[in-house]
Image: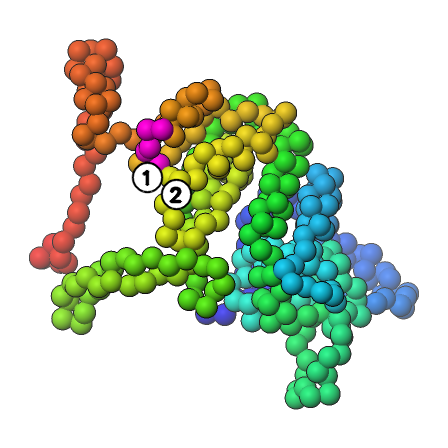
């Protein structure tokens, strides 16, 4: 089902908790009654929200970091890289799923485009007329086409993205958005791409498939892409550090680098006091390293570990609390055969 402008406005309202614009129909009617010339009439809801949001980013000097971003291999810029970054950020913020839906749902919104840095003629006619003579039919609405955004946003290499991200986190830390003692949660997720993506890794994995007769069989597939490892603040859910590595790399190899970067981003304004990880990061030398740096770690123990036996022995001796096993109800079949 295609998204509508009402749907993305709802997304924006759900993700933000304040509304700074007010509707004044009387003033609009008065100006029109006096036949005063106006450039156009635009909805103020999204534009007003974005004004406040971008003012917040500017006060934190996050926009300064964004303006320093440079694309890889870009010799001349018709549109500054920061505008591509902001446009794709708005796509995510508005919850727009399809890149091809941008002209209808975002690019024709003059108020939002003005906040990003495009003026009214650019929104109406585009930033350039390249290819206008060969165009058949009306031009795509907005300052640029979706292909231009897609082709230019990928020109930021990993080092540039890492510097951009860490600079923004330091700005948020300086503004006092984090508590004095921060609890971090570490987790990783796969970011799958095609084999043509430059620099991506690949790994062979087994997947279960169910054929038409209902028989389950296991096959080997090659997956291409990256692995994104993030350390986030447990209280605010704001990322503190991130690592992007080839998909075949094990996340545990980058725990120290992730924690070190997070501590650097928070230095002087907050302290990383606790790290929560899953069993995938259970490496003895790493948890010892965390302990030596004064960081408490929380990790689930496995059945065959000595600490598990010790904890259960202490609980059995009334020196602790015994927690029963969690029971999961699994249903099979339907109706009378359930």
**Mark 1 → mark 2, Cα distance in angstroms:** 8 Å
Q: Is residue 293 left or right of residue 15?
A: left
Give the vertical position of 148 relative to 60 (above or below). below
The residue to which callout 2 is attached is 251
325 or 153, nearer to the observer = 153
Q: Does residue 46 appear in this view?
A: no
Looking at the picture, how far across and down is residue 209, in whole percent?
22, 64
Would you say the residues marked 1 and 2 are in contact, meaning their CB atoms lie under 8 Å apart? yes
Looking at the picture, how far across and down is residue 293, in whole percent?
47, 22
Looking at the picture, how far across and down is residue 103, in whole percent?
63, 70
**Displayed quadrant of residue 62:** top right
Residue span colored magenta: 280-285
Residue in the image at 66% along x and 37% along y:
171
Q: Is residue 135 left or right of residue 327?
A: right
Residue in the image at 73% along x and 55% along y:
115
The residue to which callout 1 is attached is 280
């Amino acid at each position: 089902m295609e998204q509508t402008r009402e749907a993305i406005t709802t997304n924006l309202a759900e993700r933000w908790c304040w509304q700074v614009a007010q509707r004044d129909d009387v003033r609009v009617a008065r100006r029109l009654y006096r036949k005063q010339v106006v450039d156009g009439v635009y909805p103020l809801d999204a534009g007003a929200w974005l004004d406040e949001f971008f003012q917040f980013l500017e006060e934190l000097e996050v926009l300064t970091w964004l303006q320093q971003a440079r694309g890889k291999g870009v010799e001349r810029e018709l549109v500054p890289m920061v505008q591509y970054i902001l446009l794709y950020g708005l796509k995510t913020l508005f919850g727009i799923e399809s890149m091809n839906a941008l002209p209808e749902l975002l690019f024709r919104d003059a108020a939002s485009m003005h906040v990003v840095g495009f003026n009214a003629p650019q929104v109406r006619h585009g930033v350039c007329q390249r290819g206008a003579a060969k165009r058949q039919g009306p031009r795509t609405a907005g300052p640029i086409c979706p292909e231009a955004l897609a082709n230019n946003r990928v020109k930021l290499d990993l080092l540039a993205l890492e510097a951009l991200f860490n600079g923004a986190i330091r700005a948020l830390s300086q503004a006092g958005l984090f508590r004095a003692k921060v609890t971090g949660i570490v987790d990783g997720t796969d970011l799958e791409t095609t084999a043509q993506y430059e620099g991506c890794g690949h790994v062979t994995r087994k997947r279960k498939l169910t054929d038409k007769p209902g028989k389950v069989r296991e096959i080997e597939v090659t997956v291409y892409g990256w692995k994104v490892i993030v350390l986030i603040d447990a209280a605010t859910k704001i990322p503190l550090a991130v690592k992007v590595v080839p998909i075949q790399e094990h996340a545990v190899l980058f725990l120290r680098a992730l924690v070190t970067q997070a501590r650097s981003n928070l230095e002087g304004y907050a302290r990383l006091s606790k790290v929560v990880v899953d069993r995938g990061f259970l490496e003895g030398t790493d948890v010892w390293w965390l302990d030596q740096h004064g960081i408490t770690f929380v990790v689930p123990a496995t059945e065959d570990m000595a600490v598990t036996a010790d904890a259960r022995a202490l609980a059995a001796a009334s020196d602790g609390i015994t927690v029963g096993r969690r029971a999961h109800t699994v249903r099979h079949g339907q109706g009378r055969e359930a």
